[in-house]
Amino acid sequence: MKAAKSLAAILAILLVIAIISSAAWFLKIQLYNPKTPLSGFLVLVGLLAAGYYFMSEARAGATFPVRRIPAFDAIEEAVARSVEMGRPVHMTFGYGTISSSMAPQYIAGLGVLSHVARMCGKYGAKLIATLGVPEAIATTEEIVREGYYSAGRPELFDPAYNVRYFTDQQFAYASAVQATLIRENVGANIVVGPFYAESLIFMEAGNMVNAFQIAGTARETQVPFFVLVADYSFIGEEIFAAGALASGDKETLASIRGQDIGKLLVIVLTVIGIIMLLGGFKLADYLNWVWKVG
Amino acid sequence: MISWDILGAWLSAAMVVWIYSFAYRDNLFYKLAEHMFVGAAAGYSIALALDSLNRVMIKPAITTPETFWTTSWHYVVPAILGVLMFAKYSRKYYWLARYAVAVNIAVGTGLALRTVPIANITRQITATIVPLWGSDPVTVLNNWLLVLITIGALTYFLFTIFPRRAEGARPSPLYYVYRTLYYIGIYGMMVGFGALFANTIMTRVGFLISIYLIYLQPQYWATIVAAILAAIAILLPLIRKK
């Protein structure tokens, strides 16, 4: 029954794609960039189908254990240490916006915030979430409120103290965040999200007050700074896994299995492509094949 | 004769020194520079947003309503979503802001999803399919490193699919392959991060030199005065404490 449902869903998706493609062909509408290889589209559809399949499996009761991520496990320690020292916990998400291609990283950062807020509620820690993205203020406030309320500590929630928006100009935001780190004498500095050149500024400011630092981004140019300065760091895609772990939601965790299938696909196709080179076949030519529609 | 140019140059030099003074300690002049910077940036953003809204929607809707409602009517949708953001100030209707945030996030995710399959998957595979044999040893070594580090890094990022080691049992050969690739991935990434770090530091040093040449050197008196003021602002609280 379960397999039949999944198959029906996949067939429905393929049917919708076929209808849209046929309509575009009849109406001579160009659906996508004619220079884009078809393989990209197939990969996208395949990954979405894999994600959907594993999420429906999780809904039916299957579990997909995720390997340990030390930086994620360290969040509780960071919050507990801050409470012992009587200092607040700070969290920020970087300069990347929520309405650009950086959105997935920002969402992962917000996922980690929900975990941090719950921990702060559990241990009675003060949390300061600083922002440089105005669109995220409402969501951040809601997440922090939810964290304190779910831990049974609503009295600790004060939006004016807990959530601080500065400006959407990169270095003005950076200068305000570094000043907050020093003036509030934070005990833990947790930075997860899409970071740009401000990453090292935050890390150095956290270091000046000897804060316990946990940092992560999927922007590879900024990862070196986090790896170097932070006590624990999320490297690249680990922030997405951390976001899913933080949510504690079975379906979100199952979506990681879908992502893993994508990575396995890359490994397998690379190995097959190299073996095919022995016989003089170039897999790259097939992957770069362009199907001109419309 | 004091001109606006000279005043601007003095202010720039002073701001640079005061912002840098934070590297040693928080002080009054850093606070002044920080608040001016944040205030000016916030004001600039608001002015820019209002100007954009006026140019794109309000002005055309008032001056040329027929053209606007036939060609640019869709601008009304983000405007409504923008207004919904203000619902967060109402205890009763704060949930309406979620719709605006949800659309924002969905647009961002869609933008990210559009490029990922081609840039991060197809192009990655085609770039990694290289011959692991040949007459030039340097190219062969390079290709081996490329393939092993790419596959190793991908193995490191497998979160749910990996061979587990049962307690007390001898690990399977697959487990050893996994661990080897895992470590190749980690060390490969660390080498890459090192190169990236050095590159970025070089760029930052370049910025520092250009800031010195553009802002500090031409107005060296401003630089000296600002540095003295920052030093006083740092030392005074320390002396008072003693």
Image: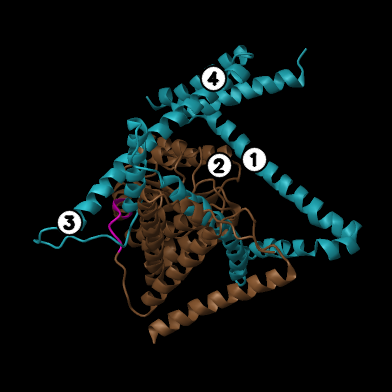
Q: A37 and B218: which one is in front?
A: A37
B62 with respect to A283 (left or right): right
Figure quadrant of residue A232: top left
Q: Identify the image quadrant of the N terminus of chain A.
A: bottom left
Which mark's residue is nearer the viewer, 2 or 4? 4
The residue wearing badge 2 is A173
Cα–Cα span, label 2 and label 4: 23 Å
Chain of the residue under label 3? B
What residue sits right under mark 3 in the picture? B173
Q: What element carries label 2?
A: helix
Disc 3 and disc 4 on one polypeptide chain? yes
Q: In the rendered image, which residue does mark 4 sit on?
A: B209
Of A258 and A278, nearer the camera is A278
Residue B144 lies, with reference to residue B69, above or below; the image says above
Q: What element carries label 1?
A: helix
> Which residues make up the magenta segment?
A66-72
